[in-house]
Image: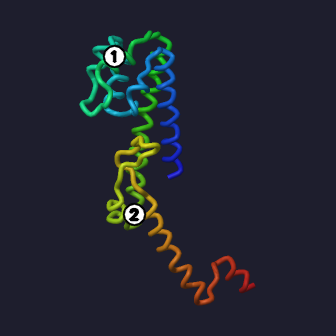
Amino acid sequence: LRHRETLIQTTSITINRMQKALVQMNLQLHVVLTDLTGTTGQRILRDIVNGQTDPRRLASHRDRHCRASEAEIVAALTGHYRPEHLFVLRQQLELYDSLQRQIESCDKEIEAHLNDLGMSALARAHLAVVRIGGMPVGITGYDIRDPLQFIEHRLQAPEAAARERGDLDPCRRRLRQH
């Protein structure tokens, strides 16, 4: 779980670097799109790194749910597409894609561990899209708190029963015996 959190933090940094590359090209996409990783943002970014620089053509990727009009997006995409900034944008987008695959792999590993612990039904009951700052960061992410609390209680129950019986943990038991 810590590794997954690190991947999510790295994803956030990568998104910020993509936004910085856009701003350095004088593209104010962040003004008209609330989420660069949304459908419209991803379509536009991928088209930019594939060489498309015509603002009208890029704005045509606008999703019907996008609040900004096509004209507003055209205005935000009017800038200078310098090769050095396009290079940075391309690398950050590739890193973003790689991080998304790693997060997905982590989610599958977490699910496998929960299944090993007999938690599959409980974990699936808490299946949710994980969001940080309103941004989805995991399609198959878990709200992991309830399953972990269940496991914690399951593990603590024998320990609490042992304490009630007067048994101590194994280390203390050995010390008392000597």
Sequence-earlier tag: 2 or 1: 1
Query: Which SS class for mark 1?
Result: helix
Image mark for residue 116? 2
**Quadrant of the image occupied by residue 64:** top left
Question: Which residue was labeled with disc 1?
Answer: 74
Query: Is disc 2 surrounded by few (<14), some (14 to 19) or many (20+) residues within 10 Å?
Result: few
Query: Which SS class for mark 2?
Result: helix
User: Is 107 above or below relative to 124?
Assistant: above
Judging depth in this view, the residue of 14 and 31 nearest the camera is: 31
User: Is 71 above or below relative to 6?
Assistant: above
Q: Contact (CB < 8 A) between labels 2 and 1?
A: no
Give the residue type that dot 1 points to.
Val
> In the image, residue 99 lies at what x, y percent?
45, 37
Judging depth in this view, the residue of 152 and 167 nearest the camera is: 152
> In the image, residue 89 lies at what x, y percent?
46, 21
User: Is 46 above or below relative to 169?
Assistant: above
| Residue at x-position 35% and y-position 65% | 122
| Residue at x-position 39% and y-position 33% | 37
Give the residue type that dot 2 points to.
Asp
| Residue at x-position 36% and y-position 28% | 41
Judging depth in this view, the residue of 44 and 63 nearest the camera is: 63
**Quadrant of the image occupied by residue 74:** top left
So how many labels did they put on this image?
2
Q: Which residue in the rendered view is the most extreme toward the left?
A: 64
Q: Which residue in the rendered view is the most extreme toward the right?
A: 178
Q: CA distance from mark 2 to mark 1?
A: 51 Å
> In the image, residue 132 lies at what x, y percent?
46, 45
